[in-house]
Image (cartoon, rainbow, N blue to C red):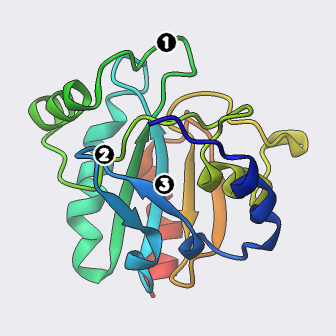
């Protein structure tokens, strides 16, 4: 389904946390991010054919280690970087389950940059700009850490392995 995000982008100006957004899960069902209210989240744009794809293993490890304390990884596949996520949503799901045994929420493939960027990513990028104030996502596996109130608190580049984020996660989990 093609979505016109112009109004959503305009409304991002009035959003103050991620709980105002919805996204479509890999199975086609809609998911309100307010369903994660009170949880610590790591939101990641992913790809199946990227040099950083092995990070799925560490993401799964983090999810398993901390989910009972209120932590979730949310994966948003994206094909905007080197066309490294060419598969259908079903192919992406099969890859993630068979290769990495992930059981954290996997969303439908989205765009994270440009005119058709998902509104959630427009909000995340404007809340936590990258190096030199750039709002663009530079590559797959950029990570946003979200506190229990739905506020983006830290942005990590693709080269930052998920296990290096553990101190920040533990601080937010308390």
Left or right of 27? Residue 32 is right
- The image shows residue 141 at horizontal and vertical percentages of 50, 36
Q: How far apart are marks 2 and 3 (CA)?
A: 14 Å
Name which residue lies at 60% across and 55% down.
120
**Secondary structure type for disc 2:** helix
- The image shows residue 68 at horizontal and vertical percentages of 22, 79
**Which numbered disc flags the more N-terminal residue, 3 or 1?**
3
Q: Nearer the viewer, residue 51 or 148?
A: 148
**Which numbered disc flags the more N-terminal residue, 2 or 3?**
3
- The image shows residue 44 at horizontal and vertical percentages of 48, 46
Q: Name the residue under label 3.
A: 43
Q: Mark 1 points at which residue?
A: 83
Name which residue lies at 76% across and 64% down.
11
Nearer the viewer's eye, disc 2 or disc 3?
A: 3
Name which residue lies at 32% across and 51% down.
25
Nearer the viewer's eye, disc 3 or disc 1?
A: 1
**Secondary structure type for disc 1:** loop
Find residue 93 and report its image quarter: top left
Name which residue lies at 42% across and 34% down.
109
Numbered label attached to residue 58: 2
């Amino acid at each position: 389904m093609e979505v016109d995000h112009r109004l959503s982008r305009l409304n991002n100006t009035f959003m103050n946390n991620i709980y105002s957004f919805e996204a479509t899960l890999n199975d086609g069902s809609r998911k309100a991010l307010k369903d994660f209210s009170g949880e610590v989240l790591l939101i990641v744009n992913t790809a199946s054919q990227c040099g950083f794809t092995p990070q799925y293993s560490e993401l799964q490890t983090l999810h398993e280690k901390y989910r009972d304390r209120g932590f979730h990884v949310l994966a948003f596949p994206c094909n905007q970087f080197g066309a490294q996520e060419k598969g259908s949503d079903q192919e992406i799901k099969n890859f993630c389950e068979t290769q990495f045994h992930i059981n954290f929420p996997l969303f439908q493939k989205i765009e994270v940059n440009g005119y058709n960027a998902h509104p959630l990513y427009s909000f995340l990028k404007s809340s936590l700009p990258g190096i030199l104030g750039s709002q663009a996502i530079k590559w797959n596996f950029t990570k946003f850490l979200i506190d229990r109130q739905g506020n983006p608190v830290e942005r990590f580049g693709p080269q930052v392995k998920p296990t290096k984020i553990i101190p920040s996660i533990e601080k937010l989990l308390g």
